[in-house]
C-alpha cells in the first residue's frame, strides 16, 4: 500500500530513538492513521527470557477492559448440556468427533478452541493440527474447563492470550484506532501489568527490556519502560 503525503510528513517527524510516553506515542499513531480502515493498535514487549527453557516461558490470558474490537471466532468441544450452553453463549461451532474431523480436514478458521475435560481424548488427536497454531486447549489458560459457557463469554468479551515467541518477544493487539484514548490506555495498562505479573522464576536480570507501540499502517515507537509499573 502506497504511503500518503500526510503519512510521509508524519514519518519524517518520528524520532526512532526517542522514548515516548504511551499518550505521546498514541498521538503520533493517530496522526499517521490512514482513515481507510480501522487499524489495530499493536504492542510488542521484548523480555529478558529464553522461552526454550520451561522456567522462562511467559504465557497467559488477560481480559482487556475495553475489549479488542475484533470478532473472535470460537470453537467448542462439548456434548449434551455443555454443548447447548456453549451454543447459547455464542460459540461459532460446537461439536465432538464431527468437529475433530472437520478440523483434520483443514477447517481451522478459529481464534480460540475450548473443550470440556471429558472431550480431551478427542481433542488430543488434534495436537499436530492445533499445536502449531497455538489453539490447543490448555487447563492453565482456562480453555479446558467444565464451565464452557463462561469461557465462551470471556473469549467473545475481550479476553486475549499472550505468549512469548522464540526471540523473547510478545506481540499482541490491544484494540482499534476507533477506540477512545482512555480505552486504549486501559487496555495497554492491563496487558503490561499481566505480563509483568507473569514474570517466570527462571528470568534473570532485566525482565522488560523494550516496549514498542505501532498500528497497522503506523511506525514503531519506543515506549519508556519506566512508565510500566513493576518493569
Image: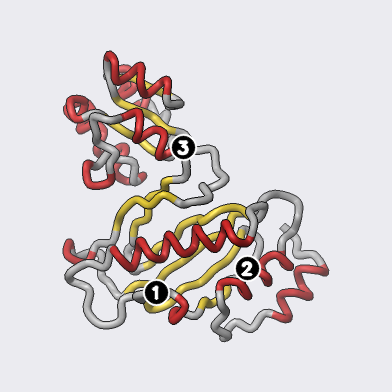
Callout 2: few (<14), some (14-19), or many (20+) C-alpha neighbours within 10 Å? many
In primary-sequence order, the first of circles 3 and 2 is: 2
Callout 1: few (<14), some (14-19), or many (20+) C-alpha neighbours within 10 Å? few
Query: Which residue does the numbered mark 1 point to in the structure image?
Result: 229
Asked if residue 169 is positioned above or below residue 116 in the image, the reply reads: below
Closer mark to the observer between disc 2 and disc 1:
1
Q: How many marks?
A: 3
Asked if residue 35 is positioned above or below residue 134 in the image, the reply reads: below
The residue under the point 54% across, 38% down is 71
In primary-sequence order, the first of circles 1 and 3 is: 3
Query: Which residue does the numbered mark 2 point to in the structure image?
Result: 26
Callout 3: few (<14), some (14-19), or many (20+) C-alpha neighbours within 10 Å? many
In three-dimensional space, the C-alpha distance between marks 2 and 1, rounded to whole angstroms, equals 19 Å
Q: Is residue 53 or residue 19 the one in the foreground?
A: 19
The residue under the point 27% across, 17% down is 79
State the residue lying farthest toward the top. Answer: 80
* Snapshot quadrant of residue 127: top left
Q: Position of residue 154 (x, y in %)?
A: 40, 39
Q: The N terminus is located in which quarter?
A: bottom right
* Snapshot quadrant of residue 201: bottom left
State the residue lying farthest toward the bottom. Answer: 17
In primary-sequence order, the first of circles 2 and 1 is: 2
Give the secondary structure at mark 3.
Answer: helix
Q: Position of residue 199 (x, y in %)?
A: 26, 68
The circle drawn on residue 156 is 3
The residue under the point 76% across, 68% down is 7
Give the secondary structure at mark 2.
Answer: helix
Q: Left or right: where does residue 197 sit relative to residue 18? A: left
Q: Is residue 196 or residue 39 the one in the foreground?
A: 196
The residue under the point 34% across, 50% down is 61
Closer mark to the observer between disc 1 and disc 3:
1
In three-dimensional space, the C-alpha distance between marks 3 and 2, rounded to whole angstroms, equals 25 Å
Amino acid at each position: 500500500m502506497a504511503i500518503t503525503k500526510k503519512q510521509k510528513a508524519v514519518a519524517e517527524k518520528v524520532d526512532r530513538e526517542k522514548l515516548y510516553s504511551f499518550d505521546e506515542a498514541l498521538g503520533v499513531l493517530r496522526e499517521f492513521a490512514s482513515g481507510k480502515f480501522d487499524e489495530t493498535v499493536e504492542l510488542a514487549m521484548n523480555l529478558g527470557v529464553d522461552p526454550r527453557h520451561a522456567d522462562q516461558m511467559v504465557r497467559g490470558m488477560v481480559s482487556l477492559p475495553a475489549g479488542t474490537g475484533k470478532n473472535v471466532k470460537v470453537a467448542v468441544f462439548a456434548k449434551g448440556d455443555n454443548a447447548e450452553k456453549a451454543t447459547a453463549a455464542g460459540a461459532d461451532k460446537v461439536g465432538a468427533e464431527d468437529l475433530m474431523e472437520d478440523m483434520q480436514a483443514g477447517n481451522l478458521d478459529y481464534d480460540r478452541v475450548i473443550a470440556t475435560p471429558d472431550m480431551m481424548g478427542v481433542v488430543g488427536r488434534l495436537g499436530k493440527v492445533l499445536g502449531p497454531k497455538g489453539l490447543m486447549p490448555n487447563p492453565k489458560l482456562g480453555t479446558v474447563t467444565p464451565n464452557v459457557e463462561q469461557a465462551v463469554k470471556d473469549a467473545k468479551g475481550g479476553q486475549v492470550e499472550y505468549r512469548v515467541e522464540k526471540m523473547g518477544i510478545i506481540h499482541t493487539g490491544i484494540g482499534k484506532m476507533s477506540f477512545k484514548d482512555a480505552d486504549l490506555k486501559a487496555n495497554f495498562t492491563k496487558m503490561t501489568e499481566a505480563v509483568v505479573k507473569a514474570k517466570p522464576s527462571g528470568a534473570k536480570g532485566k525482565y522488560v527490556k523494550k516496549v514498542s507501540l505501532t498500528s497497522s499502517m503506523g511506525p514503531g515507537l519506543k515506549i519508556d519502560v519506566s512508565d510500566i509499573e513493576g518493569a
